[in-house]
Structures are given as structure tokens and as C-alpha cells.
Image: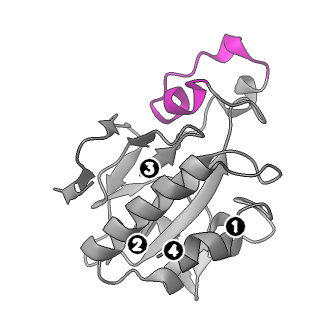
Amino acid sequence: MQIENHIFQNIKFLQSPNFNERPKNSIISLIVIHSISLPPNVYGNEYVEDFFMNKLKISDHDYFDEIKDLKVSSHLYIKRTGEIIQFVPFNMRAWHAGDSSYKGVRDCNNYSIGIELEGTDRDNFSNNQYEKLIQISKQIIKNYPEINKDKIVGHSEISPGRKTDPGDKFEWNKYLNAL
């Protein structure tokens, strides 16, 4: 698995419309780990992909009416099966972090790579997800030298009080020690 032109080769790439240019002179220097499931607590469908592509069929679930106007994306999404989907090239600004700050620097979308894991902050993540997350994180660190394992955070760390993901079930030691 390797990165060429800011896109992982040999994985599914779906170009989300929800991105823009990073600010001039911004340096990619952070990975943000998230969790997501749509509808909440339901796995094994394509609703997250549809959400990131602005193709979510609102009539499929009552919850979708609450998020119908949101424009969201992430660079990568890892399903519970281990399937990886990329939505935004790494040199572009994905819309994953929202109101956020890391070490006093606001708007983490400007300088971070967002990785969504199919899951919730209350469920364990699958071994397949950890394996793929470790593989892609190693490649990201190799390709973006400002990132190291000390510059990998959960969404909850950059948006405290607003976000709780990836949650207490995420095994940070298992993940970071493998890097």
C-alpha cells in the first residue's frame, strides 16, 4: 500500500465534493481519529459513504433528517471489515474536525488528515480495523514527515466537550505501539 499524488493506490477512491484547498503554507502535521456509524449504532451499510458524497437518501431513516444539511468528509474511512475508502486527497482540506484546536492552533482541518472508523464511542473496533489503521498510519507518517505517533489524536482531544469519539473502547496502546 503506497501513496501517490496524495492518494492511496489500490484502494477505493470516491471523490467527495466536501473539501477545499488547505490554506497557503499549511503543513500536514496531525492525524485525527474519528468514529462514525449511520444510522447511529448500525454497521455494514453504505450510508457513511453516501453521507460523505452528499447522496444520503433522507427518507431511509428518521435520523438522516437531522444531518441532511451537513457537508462532511474525511480523508479515509475504515469499515469494520477492514475495507478502506479514501474520499479526499491528503493535500486537500477534508471537512472532518469542525470547531477544533490542537496545542493552541485552531481549525485542525487546515493541517490534519482525518480517519473515520466505522463504529461508535461505545463499541470495540474490529481487529481488521486496527490492522488497516496501523498500515495506513505507517504510510502517512512515511509520506508526511511532520506527523509522528505523538501527533495522532482523537476527535475528542481537539474538540473537548463537543465530541467524544473515537471513545474509551479505542485501544490507543495497541495502535500506537504498533507504529
- Mark earlier in primary sequence (4, 1): 1
Seen from the viewer's position, the closer of residues 15 and 142 is: 142
Q: Against 142, is 150 above or below?
A: below
Identify the residue position indicated by label 1 in the image. 171
Q: Which residues are magenta?
A: 45-62
Which labelled disc corresponds to residue 111? Answer: 2
Label 1, label 3: how far apart the Cα atoms are = 19 Å
Residue type at tag 1:
Glu
Label 2, label 1: how far apart the Cα atoms are = 24 Å
| Front of the two marks 4 and 3 | 4
Identify the residue position indicated by label 3 in the image. 76
- Mark earlier in primary sequence (4, 3): 3
**Residue 73 seen in the current view:** no
Quadrant in the picture for residue 4: bottom left
Quadrant in the picture for residue 160: bottom right
Q: Quadrant of the N terminus?
A: bottom left
Residue 97 at x, y percent in the picture: 57, 60
Identify the residue position indicated by label 4 in the image. 178
* Mark 1 Cα shell of 10 Å, populated few (<14), some (14-19), many (≥20): few
* Dot 3: element: strand
| Front of the two marks 4 and 1 | 4
